[in-house]
Amino acid sequence: MYFAKKGIEEPVNIIEDTTVYACESDLCNGWMREDFATADYSCPMCGNPMKQEVRGLPKIKTDYNPFSK
């Protein structure tokens, strides 16, 4: 028997310019998106201050509903 999923396409990753905060330390490569950044803008990995940057990252779907098809 042959079973195939017909008509299902893989989702396309949309790359968009995203504002992120990156650690200023040369020894740390920590960064986080602006939407998930802490209030004091300190690196969660090493505690150093973070600076604002723009990176090309995949878009995150924020309106997730597990019951929708």
Image (cartoon, rainbow, N blue to C red):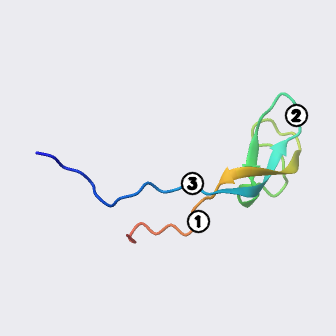
**Amino acid under disc 2:** Ser
Q: How crowded is mark 2: few (under 14 residues within 10 Å), some or many (20 or more)?
A: some
Residue at the image position 75 percent from the left and 37 percent from the top = 45
Inter-mark Cα distance, 2 to 1: 30 Å
Residue at the image position 80 percent from the left and 32 percent from the top = 28
Inter-mark Cα distance, 3 to 2: 30 Å
Query: Percent x, y for residue 36?
Result: 71, 56
Question: In the picture shown, does residue 55 fall above or below 46?
Answer: below
Is residue 3 found left or right of 52 in the rendered image? left
Q: In which quarter of the image is residue 9?
A: bottom left
Query: Percent x, y for residue 59?
Result: 63, 58
Q: Residues within 10 Å of mark 3 (few under 14, many from 20)?
A: few
Q: For the view shown, which residue lies furthest in the left direction?
A: 1
Q: How crowded is mark 1: few (under 14 residues within 10 Å), some or many (20 or more)?
A: few
Residue at the image position 73 percent from the left and 49 percent from the top = 32
Say which label, 3 or 1, has the lower sequence index. Answer: 3
Q: What mark, if any, has residue 25 been given in the picture?
A: 2
Say which label, 3 or 2, has the lower sequence index. Answer: 3
Q: Nearer the viewer, mark 3 or mark 2?
A: 3
Inter-mark Cα distance, 3 to 1: 14 Å
Is residue 58 found left or right of 52 in the rendered image? left
Q: Nearer the viewer, residue 58 or 48?
A: 58
| Mark 2 element type | loop
**Amino acid under disc 1:** Thr
| Mark 1 element type | loop
Say which label, 2 or 1, has the lower sequence index. Answer: 2
Q: Nearer the viewer, residue 52 or 38?
A: 52
Residue at the image position 84 percent from the left and 50 percent from the top = 53
Question: In the picture shown, does residue 43 fall above or below 29?
Answer: below
Q: What mark, if any, has residue 13 been given in the picture?
A: 3
- According to the picture, the residue beneath numbered tag 1 turns out to be 62
Q: How many labels does the image show?
A: 3
